[in-house]
Image: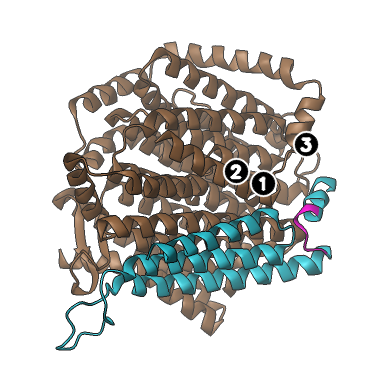
Chain colours: A brown, B cyan
Amino acid sequence: MNYTILISQLLIFIPIVVSVFIYILNKKFFNYSVYLIQTLVTVGVAWLWKACIQEGIIRFTLGGWSNQIGIEFKIDNLSLMFMTMAVMIWWIVIIYAWHQKKSDFKFLFFLMFLEGCFFGFAQVNDFFTLFVLIEIITIISSILILYKKDGISLKAGLYYLLFNSFGMMIYLFGLALLYLKAGTLNMSLVKVYLMQQNYMLVDYSVIQVSFACFFVSMCIKAALLPVYEWLPRAHTAAPSHISALLSGLLVKSGIYGLIRILEIYQIDSVYQMMFYLGFFTAISGILFAISQKDLKGILAFHTISQIGLIIMSLASHSDIGTIGAYMHIFNHFLFKSLLFLGAGIIINEYGVRRVSQIKGIGRAHPVLTLCMLIGIFSITGAPLFVGFLSKSMIKLSMTSELHLNLFRIVSLGTMISFIKFSRIFFGEPLKNKKINKGQLTGVVMLAVLCIVTFIVQLDILPSFLSINGMYSNSLKESIYYIEKVSYDNQYVLEYLAYMGTAWVMLKLLVKSDSKFWFTIRHFRMKFQDAIVSILLFLVFVLNYL
Amino acid sequence: MIFDIILAIAIIGVAIYGICISDNIIKSIICFNIVQAAIILLFILLAGYSGNEIPIITETVKDMVDPLPQALMITAIVISASITALALMFSVKIFHYYGTLSWTELGEKDVKK
C-alpha cells in the first residue's frame, strides 16, 4: 500500500520535474529522457492497475492533514482509465512528432508538464485542486495550440484560453457557494453532506445554484451544444499531433468532471435534459461536419457529435448507460486520435486541407489507408470493429423507442459525414512522396490498439468494473449479449443497409452547394455572443433544475 | 454583511456586462480580471463572517476566521495572474500579425481566408 501511494504521487512529479530539467539544460541528448519518463509512467500506471484490482479503490490524503482540509487522492476505475489513455496518447504523440520536435526543448517541456498535470487531474478527489489542475491544463494546451504562431492559431489559442477560463470562473463561483453550505471541498465528504441534506429536506437552492455552475463549466470543457464554439477553432488551428491530444483526451476531461459531479450531487431532474442536450449536440456536430470542406474541420465537428453521443448514454442514468459511456470514451479516444494523426500526415504531404483537392491516398499509401479505414469503420460502428461494442452498449441503454430512434439518427449522420471524408482515398494519386517512418509508426500503433481493444475489451470489462463494485447482473447479461452478437452476420447486413441509406442521403442533400450549407460552413460566433450564450445556458440550467 | 455580498455580486455583473459589450481584446481581458477579482472577494467575504480574529493560532485566540478560503484564494489569484499574462502576450502577437485588436475585425478576416 505504501508503494502504491508513492507511485501515484511520482506519476505527477516525475514528468513535471524531468520536463523542467529538459527546459533548463537544453541539451539534445537530454531530450531523450522523455522516453525514460514514459517508461517509468507506464510501469507506474500498470502498478496502480494491479493494486486497484487487488485492493479496490485507493484513497489517501497528502501531507498528513485530515481529509476535510487536505488534498485527498482517490484512484478508482474511471481515473485508471483516463491515466491509461494518457499514457497511450503520450507515447504515440512523442513517437509521431519526434522527427520534427526532437531538438525542440520548449515543446517537450510543455508536453511533459501537461502529462504530469493530467495525471494529477485524474486522481484528485477535491473540488479546488480539480479547479487548479483544469486551469493549468487549459493554459498549457492553449500554448501548445498556438505553437505554429501563425494568425489563425494565435486567434484560436486566445479564444480557447479566454473562453475556457470564463467557464472556470463560473466554476469558482459555484465553489464559493458550495463551501458556504458544506464547509468542505472534499468530494466524498460533500457527497455525504448532500445525502444528509436530502433526508433532512433543508432548503436546497444554494446547492442547486452551485450544481448549475459546475454543470455549465464542465459542459464548456466538454463542448456541448451552446458552448462548443472553441473546439472547432482550436482543433483546426493546432498542429495535428496536438489536435489528436486535444480531441482524444483533453475534451474528455470535461466529461470526466461531469461524471464526477453528477455522481456527487445525484440530482435526478437533470438527466432528462441531458439526453436532449446530448442529442442536439450530436445533430449540430453532424450538420456542421457535413457542411465542412476542410479535412480537419470534419474531424473536429465530428468530435462534437461523438461527445453528444456519450452524453446521451450517460443521461440514461443506469449502469449500462454509464458503462457504455466509459467504453465509448475509450474507443472514441482511439479512433479519433488515429484519424487526426492520419489527416496530419496527409495535410503535411499535400500542403492542402480541402477534401476535394486530395485524391488517391489509397493507391499512394496503402498502409496509411488501411489504418485510416480501420478508424473510419470503427467510428461508424461497423461490426468486427471497436466502435461496434460501445455503440451496442449505448443502444442497449436507451430506455424508450423514441430514444432508440434518435440514437439511430445520430449514427446515420455519422456515416454520412464519413462517406464524405472517405472520398480522399479514391482516384488517381497526385504525387507520391515518402511518409516519415515515425509518423507512420504512431498511426499503425493506434490501428493495432483499435484491433486489440476490440478483441479484449469485453474480457477486461468485468475486472475493471469490479474495482468500483459496479458489476451487476444486468451488466453481465448485456456484456454476454454483445459478445454473442459481435460475430453475427445480421448486423453486417444492417450496417450495409445504413451505409446505403447514408450514401443516398449524402447524394440528395449535399450535392448541390446550396446557400444553406454555405451559411452553416461560415457560421462563426463572435466572442461576445459566445459569452452571452454561456450566460443564457446558465440561466436555462438554473430554470430547469 | 448582506451589503458587502451584494456589492461583490454587482461588481461581477458589471464586469460580465463589460465582456459582453467591449469589442477590444484588451478591454475584454481587463473585464476578465475584474470578474476573477470579484469572485475571489466574494469567496473571502462569505467565509469571513465565521469568526472575528486573525487565523494565527496563539493561546488567546478563540473565535478564529476560517483560514482555508484565504489559502485557496491565493492560489486562485496566482492562476488569474498567469492567465492574464498569457492572454496579454497572445494579444500582442495578434496585434503584430493582424494590426488590429477588435474581435469583429478579426472575425471578418477569418471568413475571407
Indicate the amino acid at tag 1.
Answer: Asp
Contact check, label 1 and label 2, Cβ < 8 Å: yes
Mark 1 or mark 3, whichever is nearer to me: 1
Indicate the chain on which mark 2 is placed. A
Where is mark 2, residue-wise? Answer: A533
Q: Which mark is residue A529?
A: 1
Nearer the N terminus, badge 1 or badge 3? 3
The answer to which of A254 and B37 lies nearer the viewer is B37
Q: Is A42 above or below relative to A265?
A: below
Indicate the amino acid at tag 3.
Answer: Pro
Based on the picture, tell me whether residue A98 belongs to the magenta stretch: no
Q: Is A5 above or below relative to A385?
A: below
**To which quarter of the image does residue A497 belong?**
top right
Mark 2 or mark 3, whichever is nearer to me: 2
The answer to which of A468 and A375 lies nearer the viewer is A468
Q: x, y (%) of residue A480?
A: 26, 23
Q: Residue at x 43, y 75 (%)?
A: A18
Classify mark 1: helix, strand or loop: helix
Q: Residue at x 53, y 45 (%)?
A: A337
Distance from disc 1 to disc 2, alpha carbons, whole Å, reads 6 Å
Classify mark 3: helix, strand or loop: loop
Which span of residues is magenta-colored? B100-104
